[in-house]
Image (cartoon, rainbow, N blue to C red):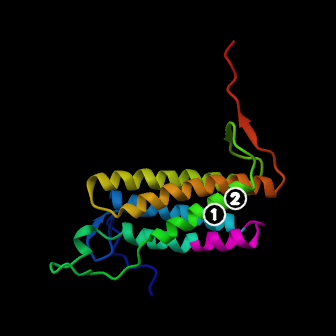
């Protein structure tokens, strides 16, 4: 596979199925943000974390490639006139979403109740987690915007929403694992 094709030299790129669009297209922004998120999850996985979390993060990285391919496929390229799927791509499943929910629930069982908002930070790994969470929220916002203009599968938005929750709870778990301190956000009153 050749890395450079020169087909994007004039500011356009191909979606899955061959449609060419400008590189600033909302669909490109959506899956580009998912790609950015995937890179940060790789950075979290590269830290000193437990094997179970590393395995789940690797699974999430695979799921994000699936989600990106779903976003990269315009609706008109998905099905033929007879209703059959034109492009055979994997899809985010209900099982993928349930895995995130189960992981959130399992981590929450081990954490103290949250009584305040928490300031990001306290440990490098925790900070990477919060950055990934913010990128995930951006991916969700861009994908929601795309869904207003085009058809996308509802599982995309659900998965991104759940993943941002997972990353928040993971940041709390990693704070505990690394014996870091959670800093509560308590608004200071203006005097």
Q: Residue at x 68, y 36 (%)?
A: 116
Q: Quadrant of the N terminus?
A: bottom left
Q: Residue at x 27, y 74 (%)?
A: 78
Residue 144, image x, y percentages: 37, 52
User: Counting other residues with Cα less than 10 Å from the Cα at mark 2, is it few (<14), some (14-19), or many (20 or more)?
Assistant: some
Q: Is residue 84 visible?
A: yes
Return the residue at label 2: 107
Residue 56 part of the magenta-drawn span: yes
Q: Are marks 1 and 2 in contact (CB under 8 Å)?
A: yes
Residue 127, image x, y percentages: 69, 52
Separation of marks 1 and 2 at Cα, in angstroms: 6 Å
Q: Residue furthest left?
A: 81
**Badge 1 element:** helix
- Looking at the rendering, the stretch of residues picked out in magenta corresponds to 47-59
190 to 148, vertically: above or below = above
Residue 86 part of the magenta-drawn span: no
Q: Residue at x 73, y 57 (%)?
A: 125
User: Counting other residues with Cα less than 10 Å from the Cα at mark 1, is it few (<14), some (14-19), or many (20 or more)?
Assistant: some
Helix, strand or loop: magenta stretch: helix
Q: Residue at x 66, y 74 (%)?
A: 55
Q: Quadrant of the C terminus?
A: top right
Residue 43, image x, y percentages: 66, 65
Return the residue at label 1: 103
């Amino acid at each position: 596979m050749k890395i450079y094709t020169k087909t994007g030299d004039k500011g356009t790129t191909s979606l899955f199925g061959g449609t060419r669009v400008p590189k600033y297209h909302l669909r490109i922004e959506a899956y580009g943000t998912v790609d950015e998120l995937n890179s940060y999850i790789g950075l979290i996985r590269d830290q000193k974390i437990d094997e179970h979390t590393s395995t789940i993060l690797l699974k999430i990285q695979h799921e994000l490639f699936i989600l990106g391919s779903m976003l990269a496929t315009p609706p008109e390229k998905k099905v033929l006139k007879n209703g059959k799927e034109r492009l055979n791509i994997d899809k985010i499943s209900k099982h993928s979403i349930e895995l995130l929910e189960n992981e959130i629930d399992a981590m929450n069982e081990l954490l103290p109740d949250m009584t305040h908002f928490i300031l990001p930070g306290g440990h490098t790994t925790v900070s990477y987690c919060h950055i990934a969470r913010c990128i995930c929220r951006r991916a969700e916002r861009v994908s929601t915007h795309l869904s207003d203009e085009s058809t996308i599968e509802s599982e995309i938005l659900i998965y991104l929403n759940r993943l941002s929750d997972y990353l928040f709870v993971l940041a709390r778990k990693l704070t505990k694992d690394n014996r870091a301190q959670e800093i509560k956000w308590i608004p200071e009153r203006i005097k």
